[in-house]
Image: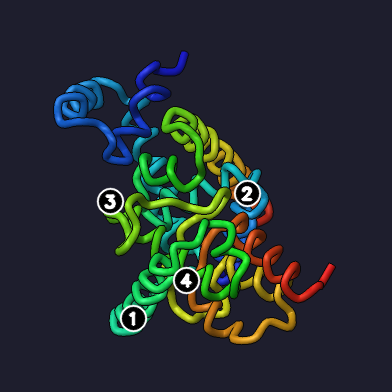
Amino acid sequence: MRRDEQRSLARLLADLPPEHREVLILREIEELDYREIAAVTEVPIGTVMSRLARARAALKARWSMRSEEERDALR
Amino acid sequence: MPCAETESRLHAYFDGELDALAAAAFEAHLETCAECRAALEGLEAMRSALRAELPYERAPAELAARVTAALDREASAAAAQKQGPEDELMGDPLAALTTLAARGRAARAGRPARGQSTPSFGRGCSPVRVAGCSRRSWPFFSFLRTSFPRAPRCSTISSMRTSARFCLRISSMWNRRTGTP
C-alpha cells in the first residue's frame, strides 16, 4: 500500500506542467525560499508566488480526485 | 465566496515569507476565519505527504560533506580559469555540472561562490543538491539514464539531483561533445 502511495503521488506530481512541478519541488522538497526560487527559475518573485499557488491547487485537486476514486473502489 | 486572504497571504504565511507584523496580522485573521484555517491544514498535509512519500533521499552527512568539499574545489578551479560561462559549459559536462552545483549552493546560502563576484546560473540551470546515491533520485537520475546511456561515471553524477531543465542542458552539452544527435 505504501509503495502504491509513493508511486501515485510521484505520478501526480509528474503529471503537472513542468513549471508547476519545478516550483513545487524547489519549495517543498528543496526548501528554497521565494527569492531563491526566483533566481533559479529566472522569473520575478510575483510569478513564483502565483505559480506556487496554482501548482498547489492543481496538485490538491488531483490528489483529492484520486482519494475519492480509491474510496469508491473500496466500496 | 472564498476568503480573499486565502488567495493573497495564506501561501506567503505558510512559506514563512511574511514579515513579523504581517504574520501576526494573518494569525489574528486565522482565529476568525475557518476557511483559511482549513486551507492552511490542507497545505501542511500536502507538504508532509510530499516530503514523506516522494522517493527522495538525503545523503549521509559525511558523504554530503565530502562531495561539497569536492564541489568547492571544482568551483574555485573553474573561476580561476576566468572563462565565460558558455566556454566553461562547453568543457567537460561533469566539471560544468559540479561548477554550477557549487554556484547554486552558494546562491542558496546568500553568498557568492569562492572566486566569483556574484552568483550566476547558466540560463535555465538550477542548483544541484547533493543527495543520496539512490537510483530513485528523481528526476535527475531518470533523465541521466535516458540522456546519457553511454556516459562515463554516471553513478557519480547520479548522486546529485536537479531539475529536469538542468538535466536537459547537460545532456545537450554531452550530445554536442560526443556527436550524438
Question: Pointers 1 and 2 in contact (CB under 8 A)?
Answer: no
Q: What chain does mark 4 sit on?
A: B
Single out the mark in the foreground, 1 or 4.
Answer: 4
Do badges 2 and 3 share one subunit?
Answer: no
CA–CA distance in space, label 2 to label 3: 40 Å
x and y percent of residue B162 in the render? Answer: 52, 62
Single out the mark in the foreground, 1 or 2.
Answer: 1
Nearest to N terminus: mark 1 or mark 3: 1
Do badges 4 and 3 share one subunit?
Answer: yes
Nearest to N terminus: mark 4 or mark 3: 4
Residue A23 lies, with reference to residue B105, above or below; the image says above
Residue B147 lies, with reference to residue A10, above or below; the image says below
Where residue B110 is drawn, which disc sits there?
3
Do badges 1 and 4 share one subunit?
Answer: yes
* Residue drawn at x 42%, y 32% as measured from the top left: A45
Single out the mark in the foreground, 2 or 3.
Answer: 3
Q: Secondary structure at mark 2?
A: helix
Q: What chain does mark 1 sit on?
A: B
Residue count near mark 3 (Cα–Cα under 10 Å), binned few <14, some 14–19, many ≥20: few
Residue count near mark 1 (Cα–Cα under 10 Å), binned few <14, some 14–19, many ≥20: few
x and y percent of residue A63 in the render? Answer: 57, 47
Q: What chain does mark 3 sit on?
A: B
CA–CA distance in space, label 1 to label 2: 34 Å
Question: Pointers 4 and 3 in contact (CB under 8 A)?
Answer: no
Of the pair B147 and A63, the residue shown nearer to us: B147
CA–CA distance in space, label 1 to label 4: 19 Å
Q: From the image, tell me which residue sits under label 4.
A: B98
CA–CA distance in space, label 2 to label 4: 39 Å
Where residue B60 is drawn, which disc sits there?
1
Q: What chain does mark 2 sit on?
A: A
Where residue A66 is drawn, which disc sits there?
2
Q: Secondary structure at mark 3?
A: loop
